[in-house]
Amino acid sequence: MDSTAPAVGAFPSPFSIEAPPGCEGWQEMYPYYALFDERRRESDEPRFWFWNSMHFPVPMPAFDVICIDSPYQAVGSWQNRVFAVPPAMGIDYRIVNGYVYISGNPVTDPAKIAERAEFFQKRAGFYYENWTELYGKWRAKMESLIAELGDLHVPELPEYEPDEVAFGDDRNTAFYEVLDAYGRALRLDDLMWQHHFEFLLLGYGAYGTFVEFCKGHLPDIPDQHIAQMVAGIDVLLFKPDAELRRLARLALDTGVDGAFAQGRSPEEIDAALEQSEAGRSWLEELEKAKDPWFNMATGDGLYHYYRSWLDDPSIPYAALIGYVTALRSGEQIERPAEEIKRERDRLAYEYGALLDDDSRGAFNNLLALSRTVFPYVEEHKFFCDYWFLTRWWNKIREFGALLAERGFLQDGEDIFQLTRHEVASALDEMVLTWATGGEPLGPKHWPPIVARRKEILERLAQWNPPPALGVTPEAITDPMTIMLWGVTTERVREWARQQDGGRVLNGAAASPGLIEGVARVVKSVNELSDLQDGEILVCGSTSPAWAPIFSKIKATVTDVGGVMSHAAIVCREYGLPAVVGTGRATSEIHTGQTIRVDGTEGVVTLLDVEG
């Protein structure tokens, strides 16, 4: 249907959106509380909801909803109940035709804001004063959690239990062990999300305080210049890509670069390298790099099909082919780190010189704090979204294999078409009938449900979600909404003005530079392989896991994102122009179109009508 039909304000009412043909009943995949419901219409319809295409660019499979619930439970707990961020509580979400829309819960009472500020200053201040020590403990917690996940055993269901169950003192039957392991797997995910948000809000908070100071004392300073002053800092998340560049140089130095031919699969490259001593030595270096750097994911981690580089080496091998080809041509493959640092330091010096002595001291202190906490804003993703989550999804696959072995599913991957609660129910019946020897109903019950949901998801993927629903707000105050998603009061009004399309898209100026080129619209990680050298990437948002492709592209344009979004940060670190938070780039721009990206002004111009 036309997603811009009946509207409340500038955007459609969430209650006016109809299911695409053939998708009737899509709601059964999701929890009752995740839906727009007539019983909540009075409070939900007047609110502003925006599509979180940064984290959820495609319709959500039923099981993957755990990666909506757990994060929003965690971010709300830390933001609202622990640090009491003064202007913002937590984030509500609703699902429309499989797509995730979110809305912040602001704090508007001045007395309540003042009350919360006391909590925030005391608690956040403790973290800022002890950042290095606390962050070291955080990394140790995450490494311990990843190890615990690896040790979690999913037992088989044997014909007869082994002797130790019959005769041992400390024994459990498989029925208990299966159910206990599943429950523990879910709780480990919750625990990861609790760790994930412990520091993240403070990273944004420190940067937000620096932004407020700059805008108060330097009224004409662009947001982009503020962001550039904290760029050029070594971040662990760029290490995997650095390792690929090192391996590419090693391939040339040892004369095995011929194996990296365009179009070859990872298996074909490995087979070619195995033919020589130098090739085998290169493969040994690759093996050393894999732990831990190949624990990167192929996407943002929040969907089950984002595998790690260990499971799906297509991205790193494609990057290796690209780097080897570039080196052969004498091209530069390093990030322009020194140039970015020089520009960072120049801006900091020149803006600092405009301030009086007292203000300059505060400026320098806030800048130093922002640079101290900034690495966490990116590094947490390596431990949480990539290393942990790719292994966690694989652990859930073990339960899927168990259900498939017993006929409850046709394929182990089908587990992700059931909600986590339905999986618990299926496991209950599976161990029940295993224990009793009875006939299970599950093999007749679940496969038709799975088949129908796969069909619905395929159809929903063809629908174009509007960037927002509901009423245009008077003001956006949630600091995380502004910095991460780039959803500002001005940006939302721009989205509303652009509902009918146009040749110019406005967004946030995320990374400076002006470039023209051919667009490549990428709506899922599976389409990354279509990117050609020199194209401009147009997407919902980017993931740091995509870093290897940044050597191929000329610029980036996203639907959603702010100056501290991952797309903005990565583009600044790679010296690429970027405009983020345009709202509708992926629906207005077509692959093959020539576009102009002005990352200094935050403007994208469509230079021809069609690609």
Image (cartoon, rainbow, N blue to C red):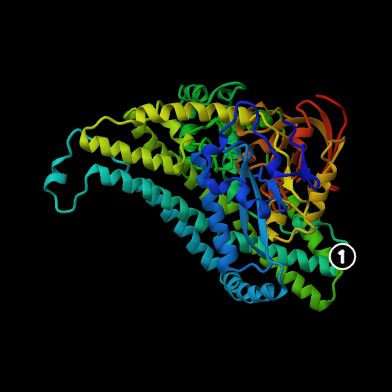
Judged left or right of residue 596, residue 289 is left
The quarter in which the N terminus is drawn is top right
Q: Please, which residue is most extreme toward the left here?
A: 167
Q: Secondary structure at mark 1?
A: loop
Judged left or right of residue 216, residue 523 is left
Residue 610 can be seen, yes or no: yes
Give the residue type at disc 1: Pro
Residue annotated with mark 1: 219
Between 452 and 588, the residue placed more toward the observer is: 452
State the image coordinates of residue 213 (x, y, percent, origin top left). Answer: 78, 69
Establish if 120 lies above or below 563: below
Judged left or right of residue 30, residue 538 is right
Residue 251 can be seen, yes or no: no
Quadrant of residue 320 in the image? top right
Between 507 and 446, the residue placed more toward the observer is: 446
State the image coordinates of residue 597 (x, y, percent, origin top left). Answer: 83, 39
Between 225 and 74, the residue placed more toward the observer is: 74
Establish if 209 lies above or below 54: below
Which residue is depicted at the point 83% across and 33% down? 595
Which residue is depicted at the point 45% across and 59% down? 141
Between 38 and 467, the residue placed more toward the observer is: 38
State the image coordinates of residue 187 (x, y, percent, origin top left). Answer: 42, 52
User: Mark 1 Cα within 10 Å, few/some/many (few <14, many 20+)?
Assistant: few
State the image coordinates of residue 33 (x, y, percent, origin top left). Answer: 55, 49
Which residue is depicted at the point 80% across and 75% down? 359
The quarter in which the C terminus is drawn is top right
Q: How many marks?
A: 1
Quadrant of residue 549 in the image? top right
